[in-house]
Image (cartoon, rainbow, N blue to C red):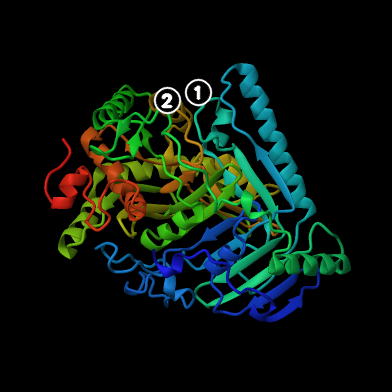
């Protein structure tokens, strides 16, 4: 393990404070020693309630200038790349415009959690629809009551509502959910009000603690509360007993009952699909497209591993080996989320909403010539561009529900973005919120994400539930925040581990159109899973040799010798 993954509690006290001040409204701002990293704060707060890390992890010391020629970040140089001995892999591209800020928060002052429901009866759907409506109404009211202006010159998340919104949360109003339950039981929503945030600007190499002093009202009362809360975080005196921490997981148990098929011969990772059954599911989707039911559907398979890896260690290893600009870690009660997402779902800045749908994928190839060809092939692919453009139209429709009609526009169409193991076509659609609507309205209008469902969305969601025959949970949900200042930023939870004490799962999928090839679609899911499989292999729990290049389809024995493939 790299020394940068350590979870040892660092020396973290008033000595880390460079300067401090109060705002006119009573919030307390503390500038920290720039040598203090976000991961050190994460270690300091490990075991705290609903620990949240919104992490711009896509930073690399060995890559060249980014596409917009921005300077490299000054912060956290040690966390930029994995040891060279771990894997031979192509250098990632930096995305500083997307990877500038990271945030750590814990110990929220209020929580709103709606547990999952798999009662598909009309009464069950109505009850859960009402429960979600009440939850979002209460969050809307609290955000209005706790509204505070943006503190100038600081990173954008300065406190507010943050956490998890599951894929099924977006299905409840559509009555298009799956028909039976599964484990782990990811809540429909797990959203919390954080009054204290550690904020990092990687471009400037600076860090702050922002303590809002809420829910107290009035400058004097807020100043007292803000200082008290900040001191509690520095001293960790309100930290729960370590017995309740994710750092002491139970012994591993058996795999879930619906984990039916080994991914490779003799491999301990199991999937909901064999190669043949996945191809058959894709073919069924293709036939529905040809029949005119839908234009596109996003289908996926889910992988399981029975292992008790420390969730924070798994996340820290992931951010070293498979960095991404919209990464995150979240302790959501009985489950923990560790995401290396490359996709922004939705952002709201001063009333302007932007969504960044991804459609179209090619694997990063070590050979520069072959990799350049793969990128050119992706950019010229009619099938991939058609997928992306269909989802852009869907996103425009979603935004039109909450934005003024003339303001909805496509800012960028089918631009190529490169990551550690894959490259994608990414578009950007934006609009201005209608008067009286908020970031919460925009989030609800956009759920579930178009790039992970299909078009038309309602019918695509029904087909996904029928063909996948299970719930997605955190996968294709969202992790992010809505600030006290009404700004917001959410990722899309793809490339995401979901962990309990004795199991790990993750899902990968792709868009299905009339031009799809079932075998190619199956291979694409393995390309997308490659970074995650490498992370698990580095812990020695997968049966796959961690010191060999990963080849989708190869058996462990073949990988060890460099020959052979799974039929």
Say whether disc 1 or disc 2 marks the residue closer to the N-terminus. 1
- In the rendered structure, the answer to whether residue 196 lies left or right of residue 555 reads right
Helix or strand or loop: what does disc 1 sit on? loop
Q: Name the residue tied to disc 1.
A: 180
Considering every residue shown, the one lying at the far left of the view is: 563
- Asked if residue 401 shows in the view, the reply is no
Seen from the viewer's position, the closer of residues 146 and 378 is 146
Q: Are marks 1 and 2 in contact (CB under 8 Å)?
A: yes
Coordinates of residue 317 in the picture (x, y in percent): 41, 59
> Any mark on residue 125, and which?
none
The CA distance from mark 1 to mark 2 is 8 Å
Residue at screen point 41% across, 40% down: 306
Please say whether residue 77 is visible from this viewpoint.
yes
Compared to residue 492, the image places residue 202 above or below, namely below
Q: Position of residue 425 (x, y in %)?
A: 34, 52
Which residue appears at 75% of the width and 57% of the height? 147
Above-or-below relation of 75 to 175: below
Give the residue number, with chain letter if any, for mark 2.
Answer: 469
Where does residue 154 sit, x and y in percent of width and height? Answer: 63, 72
Point 54% across, 65% down: residue:
102
Q: Quadrant of residue 274?
A: top left
Q: Secondary structure at mark 2?
A: loop
- Left or right: where 108 falls relative to 538: right
Q: Relative to 203, is 550 on the left or the right?
A: left
Say which quarter of the image contains residue 107: bottom right
Counting labels gives 2
Residue density around tag 1, few if under 14, some if 14–19, many if 20 or more, within 10 Å = few
Give how far across and how far down residue 71 sits, in percent. Answer: 42, 78
Quadrant for the N terminus in the image? bottom left
Label 2: few (<14), some (14–19) or many (≥20) C-alpha neighbours in 10 Å: some
Residue lying farthest bottom? 18
């Amino acid at each position: 393990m790299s020394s940068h993954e350590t979870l040892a509690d660092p020396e973290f006290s008033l000595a880390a404070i460079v300067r401090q001040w109060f705002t006119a409204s009573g919030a307390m701002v503390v500038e920290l020693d720039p040598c203090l990293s976000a991961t050190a704060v994460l270690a300091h707060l490990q075991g705290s309630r609903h620990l949240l890390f919104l992490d711009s992890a896509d930073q690399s010391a060995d890559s060249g200038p980014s596409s917009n020629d921005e300077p490299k970040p000054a912060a956290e140089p040690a966390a930029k790349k994995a040891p060279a001995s771990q894997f031979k892999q192509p250098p990632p591209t930096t995305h500083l415009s997307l990877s500038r800020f990271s945030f750590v928060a814990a110990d929220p002052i209020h929580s709103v959690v709606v547990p999952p429901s798999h009662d598909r009866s009309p009464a069950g759907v109505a009850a859960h629809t009402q429960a979600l409506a009440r939850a979002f109404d209460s969050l809307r009211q609290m955000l209005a009551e706790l509204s505070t202006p943006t503190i100038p010159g600081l990173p954008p998340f300065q406190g507010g509502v943050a956490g998890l919104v599951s894929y099924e949360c977006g299905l409840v109003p559509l009555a298009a959910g799956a028909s039976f339950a599964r484990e782990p039981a990811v809540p429909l929503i797990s959203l919390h009000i954080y009054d204290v945030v550690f904020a990092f600007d990687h471009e400037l190499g600076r860090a702050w603690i922002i303590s809002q002093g809420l829910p107290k009202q009035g400058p004097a009362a807020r100043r007292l509360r803000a200082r008290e809360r900040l001191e509690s975080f520095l001293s960790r005196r309100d930290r729960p007993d370590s017995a309740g921490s994710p750092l002491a997981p139970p012994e591993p148990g058996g795999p879930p009952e619906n984990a039916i098929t080994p991914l490779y011969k003799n491999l301990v990772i199991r999937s909901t699909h064999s190669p043949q059954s996945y191809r058959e599911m894709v073919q069924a989707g293709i036939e529905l497209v040809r029949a005119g039911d839908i234009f596109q559907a996003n289908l996926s398979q889910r992988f399981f591993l029975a292992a008790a890896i420390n969730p924070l260690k798994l996340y820290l290893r992931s951010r070293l080996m498979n960095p991404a600009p919209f990464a995150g870690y979240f302790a959501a009660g009985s489950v923990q989320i560790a995401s290396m997402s490359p996709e922004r779902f939705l952002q709201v800045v001063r009333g302007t909403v932007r969504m960044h749908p991804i459609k179209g994928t090619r694997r990063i190839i070590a050979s520069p010539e072959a990799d350049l060809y793969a990128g050119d092939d992706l950019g010229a692919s009619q099938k991939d561009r058609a997928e992306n453009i269909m989802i852009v139209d869907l996103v425009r429709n979603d935004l039109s529900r909450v934005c003024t009609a003339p303001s909805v526009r496509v800012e960028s169409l089918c631009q190529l973005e490169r990551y550690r193991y894959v490259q994608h076509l990414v578009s950007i659609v934006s609009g201005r919120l209608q008067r009286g609507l908020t970031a919460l309205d925009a989030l609800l209008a956009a759920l579930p994400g178009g790039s992970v469902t299909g078009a038309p969305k309602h019918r695509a969601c029904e087909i996904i539930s029928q063909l996948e025959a299970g719930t997605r949970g955190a996968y294709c949900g969202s992790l992010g925040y809505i600030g006290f200042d009404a700004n917001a930023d959410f990722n899309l939870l793809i490339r995401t581990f979901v962990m309990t004490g004795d199991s790990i799962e993750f899902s990968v999928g792709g868009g299905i159109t009339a031009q799809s090839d079932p075998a190619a679609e199956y291979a694409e899911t393995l390309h997308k899973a490659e970074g995650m499989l490498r992370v698990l292999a580095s812990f020695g729990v997968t049966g796959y040799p961690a010191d060999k290049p990963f080849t989708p389809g190869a058996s462990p024995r073949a990988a060890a010798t460099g020959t052979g493939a799974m039929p």
